[in-house]
Image: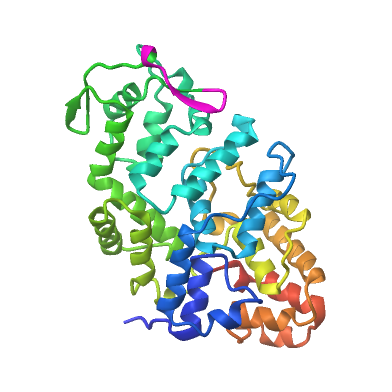
Amino acid sequence: MDELLEGPLAIAHLLRRAGFGPDAATWPEWRELTFEEALGRLLAGLDTPPTPEPEGFDVYLPGAIQQVWLDRMRSGHAPLAEKLTLFWHGHFATSNAKIQDAHLMWAQYGLLREHGAGSFRDLVLGVSRDVAMIRWLDGNANRKGHANENYGRELQELFTLGIGNYTETDIREVARAFTGWHSRHHDFVFKKQFHDAGEKTLHGKTGTFGGEEVVDILMDHPACARFIAAKLLRFFSHPDPSAEEVESLAGTMRDSGMDIRTTLEALFRAPAFLRVSSQRALVRSPVEFVIAALAAAGVEEVSEDVQYSLDRQGQILFRPPSVKGWPSGTGWLSSGAVVERLDMAQRIAKRATPSAAENILETAFEGVAPTGLAGAIAKLSGAERVAFLLGGPAFQVA
């Protein structure tokens, strides 16, 4: 049987997964906690409102919404809340490349941040009324007699059930149920004159369903909890969860009434999460890498060059490449992206304190140099040593 992480090793692992990694400034405090105490703090942060928007914040200034979110991630104010919001941003992937309205994208972030740890039903219903989503998947073109099936398809394929758990008829009938769910400027509106109030049959049920009833039907579908449980496991725990692990977590989700906080708590408490083999098994996305590197090096400010670097690494917040979201795993590690990570590590190293290398070794590697790198690290000092630690292969995984 696989060994389980304990003590500071377990805490560091938890912080990498339920946040962006240990922070040089706060790690001495965190490492003295029990696992239960650390998990309790992180879960409590799910109820913590985000830090206030800065004075003079203007959503329409280029890069403004990205900068505020990056600052919130780096602050460590509520790491699990921001990490979960990042998960939902990739799950309900919506891009400002099409929306062309930063106000709507920032409003969607607020929806995901506020409701991301609550009822999955309420979250899906909120996303269904979100103006950015309505525009993204052409909801305003969804009218009685001319149903647009974009949202009906993606709601089932990408947001709730997964491929193979719905039919083309289900797509058509779900689209009919959401006819008239439109937007006007920055607000959701229900236009009764465009709504198809006729009888619909989907997933074995028949009725004059509207969008709310459809969401309830999807929540009750046995595939829904399994689909979301599997995605949560792959994002927060390990890349290849077994069918038994997925079904166990899905059972917790169903029993809790599709409550995300309860589901996450069960995920973090599961033995599979704390297995030694689960440690450093996930490739960090560019955003996760940069925030983790800044935290480990003790650099508090997210400088302007970070957004340009994230662009070159392939992850611009509020601009996922498609409705399927961003890649994962080694998909982040193209040759160009790796070179950019090395460059970013060097820029962070130049801003770090003289003791940063020791802090990185302590926070990211529990005081032990990564296997095979001890000799090279010993020959380096100052910024070169910091850059080597942050840019090396061992720091690219969490």
The picture quadrant where one finds residue 178 is top left
Could you tell whether 45 is left or right of 153 in the image? Answer: right
The picture quadrant where one finds residue 286 is bottom right
Residue 134 appears in view: yes
Q: Position of residue 127 (x, y in %)?
A: 44, 37
Q: Position of residue 381 (x, y in %)?
A: 80, 83
Could you tell whether 12 is left or right of 71 in the image? Answer: left
Residue at 50%, 50% in the rendered image:
113
343 falls in the magenta region? no
Foreground residue, 224 or 369?
A: 224
Q: How many marks?
A: 0
Residue 165 appears in view: no
Residue at 35%, 49% in the rendered image:
119
Task: Work out whether 263 lies above or below 205.
Answer: below
| Image quadrant in which the C terminus is located | bottom right
| Image quadrant in which the N terminus is located | bottom left
Task: Work out whether 304 lies above or below 148.
Answer: below
Foreground residue, 230 or 208?
A: 208
Q: Position of residue 68 (x, y in %)?
A: 67, 51
192 falls in the magenta region? yes
* Bounds of the magenta segment: 184-193
Residue at 73%, 66% in the rendered image:
345
Q: Position of residue 19 (x, y in %)?
A: 53, 65
